[in-house]
Each structure stands twice: as structure tokens, then as C-alpha cells.
């Protein structure tokens, strides 16, 4: 079975996000009013082969915790769906 | 007395490896030894330096991938057994990712790479790496990094401060901690921290680039002397 | 799909779409003895383009001096090389990446750095420094800021990651570059003479390898637009013409290549840069007087379904073509594996001087190597001076208009003009201290100064060019680029050794542009000859035009100088009471200068006259004063004249010090003396104790000179009777001009 | 009305993705077999005030094209939902 995974990584709540702040200022100076709380994170997509939804989920979770996010400063979520489905 | 072998770890994207190798070689009593990232042994070295650079490209996060390399498994064990480990720039990032030092290094708050001559204050001489400095001494090491913004929660920061584990701080020419003198937004202007036993030091500035007055400063020699003595 | 493409008939329209003229096509048919197929046509269009074949420029480039006892490798290889003593040679070249940077500034600049690095390390040299010479439009325009911000980031991120310090360069802002920025990068490498590697496909039977990244559809330019219309199922969207740089792979390639060359396993190595596999393979064969046979089916791909046409023309980055020794293939593979780089055997060197391309064993192209490399058409024509020159010269404002300019206000305007202002915002983003040999980095002096490890000597590096001068006076402009670089190198005590050039011009098919080009090359040739600084490598970039017109013609020069004893450099120390000495005549020439352009917004008049004999003599005088410790600071007088030079010298002194200038007596208008950009001039700081000796020495040379002022303790900069300003106030204007503008974030991405 | 916007930015198809490539190698050498086609992109979240779903959508689309994505080499999508809803 091939699953399509999308991982979303963002700085934890309460951590200052300078990139988000900068974008927010930039949007403002371009005249986009009313934009607030911009945060910039990562969106990582891939396919993974394997059997058993739960087993794969566990594996992806581990990949996120070990490598894709630094859990000292970041939090992550991910979604999974069967590819081609 | 035979020279003390000091390992210099080379990841494929390490680019200060030669600088560090030369710095160790220039330290009386020390003998540099290359350690390749794919190696699973430490060649009998008694101290280790993780040099600056971009270990595995560092596109995702500096040091994120390097910490899982074969050599790092051994470096982690070496540090846990009390061996001296010096992480400079990317080396600091790897030590933080590996959990040998607390906190994390985020992208510089100004969002750009920054390279300059940086005055630093030696805020603790408890660690063997700074044993040859005076407390409060101002030294100059170059900095050159894009992800040197040190962050940790307040509790951790307090703990580091009270235990004398904040070793270097970014200061201005007169030795004052100011926002303008902080090149990357680091919490409490922290430039380098040590482990509880003082034997692991991570810092963003480059003592390896401050080994000769010909390039502007020789203040880095003390750090390497400290490493050699801790390893001896 | 593949079949359809290969069978695409070669009609006159298809030929024209490939940028080939009908007479050029006829010549191809004559050389082949038959009509080319579609793939072969694409190959010719590339190899016969200006970019690869230099068809408009080659005839003139041959006028540049390229010989000298110091030259180890002249033009013709991936980079030039000069001897620096102690068994060492310095390898260097400059290259442009203007068009890619206009389309995608970050990636364009980054891949420009990547390309020039490869040119140097394929020669077996370890890159030890980069310089970047940049031109943009007006920094008050958000799109210009966007280009500037991302070009700088691209240059920095790539060089920083690979670990090569960017130690110098220049940045100029002028409206003529608004639609077409210039991004020229220079790389300098170091090797022992015996390690020099040439890009030759020698030894029939030797295997040919592709080392490094896989091949995608990157950068298949103009020609491929046509190809993609044939491929209806692929949308233009999926046809990236922008190349993405991968500095980590470059670093691997750098280490692997140097190891490979040191191991003796390689016969020849060539970067697969512009025109990728096609030019690298045919040029290597041409140099080796051999043939080459490559099976494109064996070239590792990043994408499925690529045609031979695409594989041959792809400009995917971070790839090398390697000709190996037949008994050394295991050594080659071991090195590739150590660095985790794919390495694939794709062909073989043949004895027959044919360039043969197969796909899975079937022949796709067969072209005599000479037809691709040596038979490139060359166009040389004599054209008359264009009309605009007389108009520009006539536009020179009269003395009354100049006298009306408030000199103190003009000084402030000049110091805060981005072209003159401090470039810290740029070079702080570049790692300029890695490799620990940077004695004088960016912002420290007119040229960078690098230690040569294991020796007593140092090399000086500088880039220079002035588009405004060249626009007003093409020949002088070419010469002035060379002499300014030589002055910069001399200011750190070094003697010019050799140069590389990057010739940025508009469309050479236009007479005016062609005239500018030919004249500028002549100017460069004259100056290089007079200064004994041969041209050992270079690059031509034409078609730098936007809807608003051509850029100012901008030849840029990268110079390498040698300081045999690194201790004989200027010490930079100064104290109140030291003398400020002007070597050279008093200023008077305002034509084509910064006072007119920055204060009046005028491009007018003639460029400064070039006296090559004076340039040579004055540079020697300055070097000898530095060598003997009689001058502790040296700065050439260029943009903005004496006023700007004095301010810049002052900004480099310990805080608290000032400078009081004396202006020459008997002048009613101080503008010429303050702002004149006449050549062969330097401003020196002479320690008070040395002044008597310096006077005697200068008097003996017969060169014009005067004591132009002194270092003061009052923290002010005084401009004679014109008035004075707080040093800190002027310094702030100068230091913050670019930073303040870049704090505006609307161009951030 | 406050809308929560999520923007997803990725390099266009066919573009070399050095980040994705190195990450894929890393995952492999960490022993996660069967992972394929890793691509690393950006995930930008923010809130925007404004009236009329379509108007806001048009505005967000413009923001993406002008600032949040570099459309020369990247493509983007976004989602929007009413905040607090
Ligand atoms: N693009 C750049 N990259 C690196 N260094 C630069 C760049 N532009 C300017 N510099 C450095 O800033 C200093 C001043 O440059 P410039 O203003 O061109 O000086 P000058 O007018 O004396 O030639 C030099 O040290 C130069 O190398
Ligand atoms: Mg200049």
C-alpha cells in the first residue's frame, strides 16, 4: 500500500516567529490590511510504502519527532491518505 | 609526553574542518586526528571538535540530520562518559539537536546570515574550555551563521545562568550586553553554553578563526588550550 | 514523444527559432555534407551561440594581451592561472549570470556562484575566495530592492554553504540596470603547479563519466521553447528554465573532484555548465584532438521521458564530465562513493574526431568536433562612433551650473548615495572569514588581502568597472576599469599580476553597442599591456537589454595582485597630527562623474583621461611608501573625488579622529578639487615622523603631489574653506544609506 | 468576519528540490524504507479580516502571487475557513 503523507511543522505557540512577523509587515506595507498572526512553517509531502495504517502512522510520527521537527521549539501534525485512492 | 589526540569530525558539508584541524595543530601538546562521519570508532582520541559548516546541507534545520550519523552515536557516548567535546557553530547546532546541550538554535531574528567580528564576554570560567580566561574578559571571535538564535524556556535559561553554564555572551565594544550588539536575537545574548559538567561546550562564534593576529585576533587559542588540557 | 521530436522536420522556421541565420544553416549543411536532424540543429544552435561560441566577440578578444612570465594558463581553459611563487599558482575567472538573475534573483545568483566555483575546481584548484560585482537600478524602486535583496542572499547562501569566503566586490546602482541587473562573480583558487588539470579528452579508449547531480529539464532555453510546443501533453508550467542551486551537492562535487585529480585517476575534468553535456563533451574532445562517443540513455535523469535533445541541452547544475584512466575506474568509483555522488559511465574517447551521440546504441547525432568548436562563425565589423556620444559630451554643464552646486550638501548627497555608501548590508551576509586566510576582508581596504598558507606572501583581489564612464567614452571606460582595479590592489601594497574580465553589453547586432564593445576591449588591452597585467580568463555577456534599452556598457575587471611579503602592507594606524598626502595632480575633471550623476542626475561629458604612464608610476610610488612603512593608510581617489576619498579614509580611522583637508589655493570654484575624478591619484596617511622623508621621496620622483591635509583629534572632517561636518554625522549617512532603504520590507519574499 | 487562511507553497513540478532530496536520503539512512518523492515546501497560516468570501479569496490569492510564493519557481494553494466557526 502506498500512502501520501503531508506533514505540517510550525513553531510552538508562544515562540516568536521572526519570519512570520516580517511577512506580516511586508503584507501591511503592500496595503493588505487586516492580516494578523502570520506564522511560517514547513509543509513536507512524501509517499510511503507499507502495510497497516496504524503501523505506518506510528512510523511517520516517529520520523516527525526524530527528524522533521525539533520538538524543543516546533510542533507538528500530519495527514495520510491512500495514494491513487 | 606524547601529544594528546584530538578528533576533528568531518561531515560531508563541514567547511571549517581544515580551520579547526589547523587550530588544534597549532595548540601545543595537541595532535589533530580526522574522524569521518561514516566511521563507527573514535581512533582513540581524547577530545573531540565538531567544526562549523553545513553538515548534510542543513536545508531542513541545521544539524538535524548530522546528529543521526554513525560518528555522532560515538560522540554522544564519549560526551556522556565525560570526554571533552567542543561544538563550534554548526557543531553547536548539532550538539543541541543531539540533546547534549539544552535549547535550540533558530534562524537569526534578522533572517539573514551574519558575518562579523564579534566582541564576546567570558561569563564563566568554570568550564575547562575557558579556564585560561579571566572572568568578564572581552575577547573577539568572528561569527558567521544564519541560524544562531539561541532559544530555551525561561526555566532552562535560569538554570544555565545560576549554574555558570552561560560561557560566552555577545557584547558591544565596551563589554555591555545590548540589543544592538546581539547579532541574531539569542535569548539573553547567549553565544555559548556548557554542559553540567562543563566538558561539552557549544558556541556560535569561531575561536578557530581567531588563532592569529594576521587575521585579526588570537583570542581563540585559549579555547583550544582548554580543550587540550581537558583531554590530557 | 521521443520519436515525434526526433522526427521534427528541420524547416526554415525551425532554424530561425533556434536563432541561426540562413547562411549559418547553409554552412552547417556544408560542414556535415547533409541536412542536420532536429537534435543536431539544437546542438549547433547552442555551440554557435554567442554564449558558447563567442561569435561576435572572439575576433576582438584576441587583441587582449594574454602572455607574460607569470602566466601559467591563459584563456581557453575553464579558468586562467598565474604563478605566485613558492610553487603555487592562483587560478581565477569571472563570469556573469545576469539573465538568470533577472528572472529569479536568488537562484540566478546562487547558480552563478556555483558555476564559477566549478570552473576553478575543475582545474584542480581549491577555491579560496569569491568576489561579486553587482549592478542594479535605483534602490528606491521596490522591484530593484527585491532583486538586490535576493541576489545578495543567493550569492551568500551558496558561497557560505560551500565554505568559500566572499572577500570583496562592488555594487553600483544606476537606472540603466533597472530591467537588467548585472551579477558577475569571480572565483579564485589555489594549487601547486604540478596539480594543474586541463579539461582534455585525451587517450582514445578512455572511459567518460558523468559525476554529480542527475539531469533534469533545467535551463533548456530558447531552443526548448520550441521543443515544448511540440510536446503538447506537457504544459509550459512543467518546463523549468530556472535552475535551482544545490550548494551541498556542489561541496561534495568540489571535494570529490579535488580528490579525484590528486589521485591521478582522471585524465581530464570539465564542468557541465552552460550548454551542459554538449559543450563539455565537444570542447574536451576539441582540446584533446580526439572524438567522443556518448550514450544519452546512460545519463542519470531526474525526470522520465527526456529526449536526447533535452539531455544534451540541459543545464542542470552540479555535474562534471570526467575522462578517466582505463585502469583507474575502481579508484574513481571509490571516491564517488565516499562522497555519496552518483558516477556513471556514459561513453568513451574515440580516435576519429567525431562527436557521436547514441541513444541506447542508436546513433542520434554525428558531427565533426571541429564543426562545433572551431567552425563557429565569427563576425567582426568596423562601425562608426554612434551619434549619442557627441550628444552626451555636449551635455556637459558649464562652469556656472557647477559653481551653483552647494559643495557641503553635495558631499552629504554623495556619501549617502547607495553606489558610494558603505556596503556592509551586503558583505555582512557573506562569510568572509572561513578558511582563516582573510587578512583584509570587505570594507577594510580597497582590495581584499589573503594570506597564502605556508608562505610569507599574500594576494590582493579587487573587482572594478564603471558603466557610466564606458557609456560616455567606451575606450577610456575599458581602460579605467583596469587602472582602477590596479589602484585598488596597489593600495594594499600589492603589484598587479593578471586580470580576468566580464564584458557586459547590450545587443551586439546594434552598431552602437558593437562600437562600445570593440572600443572597450581596446581600452582594456591598452591598459593591461601598460600595467603588465595580462588577461588570463574572461566572459562575455551580450543582450543585456530591457524594454527601456541597453544597459550602460559595463566591462568589469577582476584583478589579482601579489604582495611578496605580507608584512609590507599598510598598517592602518593613525593619530592626530599625521599628514594626509595626495599623490597625483589636483582634481579638475567632473565629466561623467558622480557629482553630475548623483547630484544633478546627469550623465554628461567625457570620462577622465587615462594616462597609463602616470598610473604605472604613481602605483609604484604608493607601493614603495607602503612597503617601507611610510604610508599607514592608502586609498585611491575615484567616485566622488577627493571629498569622498577623504571621508572614507576618515571613517576607517580609530573613532574620535578627524581629517582637515586643505584645498589648493587660487581656485574660485572648489568643485574640481573636491569632486574631480582625474586618474592616477591616491590619498595617503603619513605618520608625522615620516613626513620629511616622504616629502623627499616624492620630490625625487617628479610625480605631482602635495600635502592635502592632516589627521585631527577633533572628530570633524573639514573641506578647506568650504566648511566642515562632524565625522560621526557623515559616517552615519554613509553607513546607513543602504541599510535604511533595505528595512523597507514590501519586497520581502 | 475573520477567516483563518492556510497557504501551501511548493516548488513547481520538475524543479530540483535539494531540500527534499537530502531529506529523503536522510530518512533512508535512518532506516525508514519505502519513503519516496519527498518535497519540502512552506505552510503559512494567518487570519484575515474582511467582508465577503469571494473578495477575501481574491485578496489572499493576490497576496500569494505577490509575496507569499515566488511564482517563477513555486506554486501555491490555500484554504480558508471562518475563524471561531
Ligand atoms: N558586492 C560586494 N561583495 C563583497 N564586498 C563588497 C561588495 N561591494 C563592496 N564590497 C566591499 O566594500 C568595500 C568598499 O567597496 P567600494 O565602495 O567599491 O570601494 P571603492 O570605491 O574604494 O572601490 C570593499 O572592501 C569592497 O570589497
Ligand atoms: Mg568602487
Image: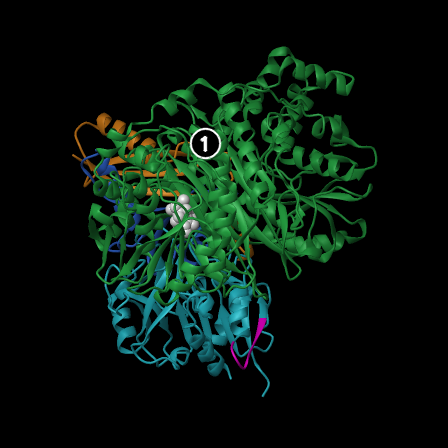
Chain colours: A blue, B cyan, C green, D orange
Residue that numbered label 1 is attached to: C470
Secondary element at tag 1: helix
- Asked whether C278 or B162 is in front, the reply is C278
- Asked whether C596 or B33 is in front, the reply is C596
- Spot occupied by residue B10 in the image (x, y as percentages of width and height): 55, 64
- Spot occupied by residue C164 in the image (x, y as percentages of width and height): 51, 54
Q: Residue furthest toward the top?
A: C12
Give the total of numbered labels.
1
**Left or right of residue C151: residue C435:** right
Quarter holding residue C589? top left
- Spot occupied by residue C547 in the image (x, y as percentages of width and height): 40, 21
Question: Cβ of disc 1 within 8 Å of ligand 2?
Answer: no
- Where the C terminus of chain C falls, by quadrant? top left
**Height in image: C26 above or below C526?**
above
- Spot occupied by residue D42 in the image (x, y as percentages of width and height): 37, 43
Which residue is located at x 45 percent, y 54 percent?
C491
Could you tell me if residue B190 is visible in this image?
yes
Q: Which residues are magenta?
A: B27-33
Which chain does the residue under circle 1 lie in? C
Which residue is located at x 51 percent, y 73 percent?
B48
Could you tell me if residue B153 is visible in this image?
no
Quarter holding residue C459? bottom right
- Asked whether C323 or C472 is in front, the reply is C472
Which residue is located at x 34 percent, y 61 percent?
A72
- Queried whether the magenta region covers residue C720, the answer comes back as no
**Left or right of residue B143: residue A52:** right
Amino acid at each position: 500500500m502506498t500512502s501520501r503523507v503531508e506533514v505540517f511543522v510550525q513553531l510552538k505557540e508562544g515562540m516568536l516567529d521572526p519570519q512570520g512577523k516580517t511577512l506580516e509587515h511586508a503584507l501591511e506595507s503592500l496595503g493588505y490590511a487586516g492580516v494578523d498572526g502570520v506564522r511560517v512553517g514547513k509543509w513536507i509531502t512524501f509517499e510511503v510504502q507499507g502495510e497497516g495504517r496504524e503501523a505506518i502512522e506510528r512510523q511517520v510520527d516517529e520520523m516527525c519527532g526524530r527528524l522533521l521537527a525539533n520538538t524543543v521549539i516546533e510542533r507538528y501534525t500530519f495527514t495520510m491518505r491512500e495514494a491513487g485512492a | 609526553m606524547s601529544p594528546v589526540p584530538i578528533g576533528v569530525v568531518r561531515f560531508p558539508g563541514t567547511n571549517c574542518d581544515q580551520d579547526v584541524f589547523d587550530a588544534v595543530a597549532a595548540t601545543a601538546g595537541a595532535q589533530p586526528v580526522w574522524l569521518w562521519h561514516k566511521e563507527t570508532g573514535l581512533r582513540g582520541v581524547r577530545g573531540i571538535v565538531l567544526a562549523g559548516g553545513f553538515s548534510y546541507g542543513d536545508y531542513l534545520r541545521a544539524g538535524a540530520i548530522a546528529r543521526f550519523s554513525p560518528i555522532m552515536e560515538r560522540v554522544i557516548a564519549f560526551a556522556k562518559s565525560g570526554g571533552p567535546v567542543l561544538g563550534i557553530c554548526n557543531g553547536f547546532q548539532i550538539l543541541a539537536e543531539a540533546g547534549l546541550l539544552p535549547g535550540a538554535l533558530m534562524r537569526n531574528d534578522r533572517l539573514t546570515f551574519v558575518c562579523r567580528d564579534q566582541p564576546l564576554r567570558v561569563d564563566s570560567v568554570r568550564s575547562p574550555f575557558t579556564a585560561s580566561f579571566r572572568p568578564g574578559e572581552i575577547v573577539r571571535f568572528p561569527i558567521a551563521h544564519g541560524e544562531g538564535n539561541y532559544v530555551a524556556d525561561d526555566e532552562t535559561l535560569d538554570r544555565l545562568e545560576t549554574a555558570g553554564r552561560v560561557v560566552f555572551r555577545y557584547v558591544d565594544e565596551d563589554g555591555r550586553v545590548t540589543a544592538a550588539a546581539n547579532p541574531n536575537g539569542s535569548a539573553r545574548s547567549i553565544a555559548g553554553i556548557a554542559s553540567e559538567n562543563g566538558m561539552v561546550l557549544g558556541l556560535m562564534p569561531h575561536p578557530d578563526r581567531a588563532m592569529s593576529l594576521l587575521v585579526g585576533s588570537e583570542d581563540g587559542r585559549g579555547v583550544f588550550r582548554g580543550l587540550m588540557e581537558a583531554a590530557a | 514523444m521521443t520519436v515525434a521530436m526526433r522526427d521534427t522536420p528541420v524547416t526554415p522556421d525551425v532554424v530561425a527559432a533556434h536563432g541561426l541565420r540562413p547562411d549559418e544553416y547553409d554552412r552547417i549543411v556544408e560542414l556535415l555534407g547533409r541536412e542536420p536532424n532536429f537534435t543536431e540543429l539544437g546542438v549547433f544552435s547552442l555551440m554557435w551561440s554567442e554564449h558558447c561560441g563567442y561569435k561576435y566577440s572572439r575576433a576582438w578578444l584576441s587583441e587582449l594581451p594574454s602572455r607574460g612570465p607569470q602566466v601559467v594558463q591563459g584563456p581557453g581553459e575553464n579558468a586562467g592561472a598565474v604563478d605566485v611563487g613558492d610553487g603555487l599558482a592562483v587560478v581565477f575567472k569571472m563570469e556573469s549570470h545576469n539573465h538568470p538573475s533577472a528572472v529569479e534573483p536568488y537562484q540566478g545568483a546562487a547558480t552563478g556562484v556555483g558555476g564559477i566555483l566549478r570552473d576553478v575546481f575543475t582545474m584542480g584548484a581549491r577555491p579560496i575566495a569569491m568576489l561579486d560585482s553587482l549592478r542594479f537600478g535605483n534602490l528606491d524602486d521596490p522591484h530593484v530592492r527585491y532583486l538586490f535583496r535576493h541576489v545578495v542572499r543567493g550569492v551568500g547562501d551558496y558561497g557560505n554553504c560551500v565554505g568559500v569566503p566572499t572577500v570583496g566586490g562592488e555594487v553600483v546602482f544606476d537606472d540603466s540596470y533597472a530591467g537588467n541587473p548585472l551579477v558577475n562573480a569571480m572565483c579564485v583558487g589555489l594549487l601547486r603547479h604540478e596539480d594543474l588539470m586541463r579539461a582534455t579528452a585525451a587517450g582514445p579508449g578512455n572511459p567518460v563519466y558523468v559525476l554529480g547531480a542527475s539531469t533534469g529539464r533545467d535551463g533548456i532555453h530558447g531552443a526548448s521553447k520550441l521543443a515544448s510546443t511540440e510536446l503538447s501533453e506537457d504544459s509550459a508550467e512543467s518546463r523549468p528554465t530556472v535552475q535551482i542551486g544545490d550548494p551541498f551537492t556542489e561541496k561534495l562535487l568540489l571535494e570529490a573532484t579535488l580528490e579525484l585529480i590528486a589521485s591521478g585517476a582522471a585524465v581530464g575534468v570539465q564542468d557541465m555548465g552552460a550548454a551542459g553535456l554538449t559543450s563539455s563533451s565537444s570542447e574536451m574532445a576539441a582540446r584533446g584532438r580526439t572524438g567522443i562517443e556518448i550514450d544519452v540513455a546512460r545519463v542519470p535523469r531526474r525526470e522520465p521521458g527526456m529526449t536526447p535533445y533535452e539531455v544534451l541541452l540541459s543545464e542542470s547544475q552540479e555535474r562534471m564530465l570526467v575522462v578517466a584512466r582505463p585502469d583507474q575506474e575502481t579508484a574513481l568509483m571509490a571516491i564517488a562513493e565516499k562522497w555519496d555522488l552518483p558516477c556513471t559511465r556514459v561513453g568513451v574517447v574515440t580516435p576519429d574526431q567525431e562527436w557521436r551521440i547514441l541513444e541506447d546504441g542508436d546513433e542520434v547525432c554525428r558531427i565533426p568536433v571541429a564543426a562545433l568548436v572551431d567552425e563557429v562563425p565569427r563576425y567582426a565589423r568596423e562601425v562608426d562612433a554612434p551619434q549619442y556620444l557627441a550628444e552626451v559630451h555636449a551635455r556637459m554643464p558649464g562652469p556656472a551650473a557647477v559653481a551653483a552646486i552647494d559643495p557641503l550638501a553635495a558631499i552629504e548627497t554623495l556619501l549617502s548615495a547607495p553606489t558610494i555608501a558603505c556596503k556592509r548590508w551586503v558583505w555582512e551576509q557573506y562569510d568572509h572569514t572561513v578558511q582563516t586566510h582573510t587578512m583584509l576582508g570587505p570594507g577594510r581596504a580597497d582590495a581584499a588581502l589573503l594570506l597564502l598558507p605556508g608562505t610569507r606572501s599574500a594576494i590582493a583581489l579587487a573587482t572594478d568597472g564603471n558603466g557610466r564612464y564606458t557609456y560616455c567614452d567606451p575606450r577610456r571606460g575599458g581602460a579605467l576599469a583596469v587602472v582602477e582595479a590596479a589602484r585598488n590592489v596597489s593600495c594594499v601594497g600589492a603589484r598587479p599580476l593578471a586580470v580576468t574580465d566580464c564584458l557586459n553589453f547590450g545587443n551586439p547586432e546594434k552598431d552602437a553597442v558593437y562600437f562600445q564593445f570593440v572600443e572597450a576591449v581596446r581600452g582594456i588591452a591598452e591598459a593591461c599591456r601598460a600595467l603588465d597585467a595580462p588577461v588570463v580568463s574572461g566572459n562575455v555577456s551580450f543582450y543585456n537589454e530591457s524594454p527601456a534599452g541597453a544597459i550602460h556598457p559595463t566591462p568589469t575587471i577582476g584583478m589579482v595582485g601579489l604582495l611578496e611579503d605580507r608584512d609590507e602592507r599598510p598598517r592602518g594606524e593613525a593619530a592626530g597630527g599625521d599628514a594626509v598626502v595626495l599623490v597625483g595632480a589636483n582634481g579638475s575633471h567632473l565629466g561623467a562623474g558622480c557629482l553630475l550623476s548623483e547630484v544633478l542626475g546627469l550623465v554628461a561629458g567625457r570620462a577622465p583621461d587615462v594616462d597609463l604612464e602616470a598610473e604605472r608610476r604613481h602605483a609604484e610610488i604608493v607601493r614603495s611608501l607602503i612597503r617601507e612603512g611610510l604610508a599607514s593608510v592608502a586609498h585611491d581617489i575615484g567616485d566622488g573625488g577627493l571629498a569622498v576619498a577623504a571621508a572614507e579614509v576618515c571613517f576607517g580611522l580609530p573613532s574620535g579622529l578627524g581629517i582637515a583637508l586643505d584645498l589648493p589655493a587660487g581656485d574660485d570654484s572648489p568643485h574640481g578639487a573636491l569632486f574631480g575624478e582625474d586618474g592616477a591619484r591616491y590619498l595617503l596617511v603619513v605618520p608625522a615622523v615620516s613626513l620629511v622623508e616622504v616629502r623627499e621621496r616624492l620630490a625625487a620622483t617628479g610625480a605631482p603631489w602635495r600635502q592635502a591635509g592632516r589627521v585631527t583629534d577633533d572628530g570633524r572632517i573639514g573641506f578647506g574653506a568650504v566648511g566642515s561636518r562632524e565625522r560621526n554625522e557623515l559616517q552615519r549617512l554613509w553607513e546607513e544609506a543602504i541599510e535604511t532603504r533595505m528595512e523597507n520590507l514590501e519586497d520581502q519574499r
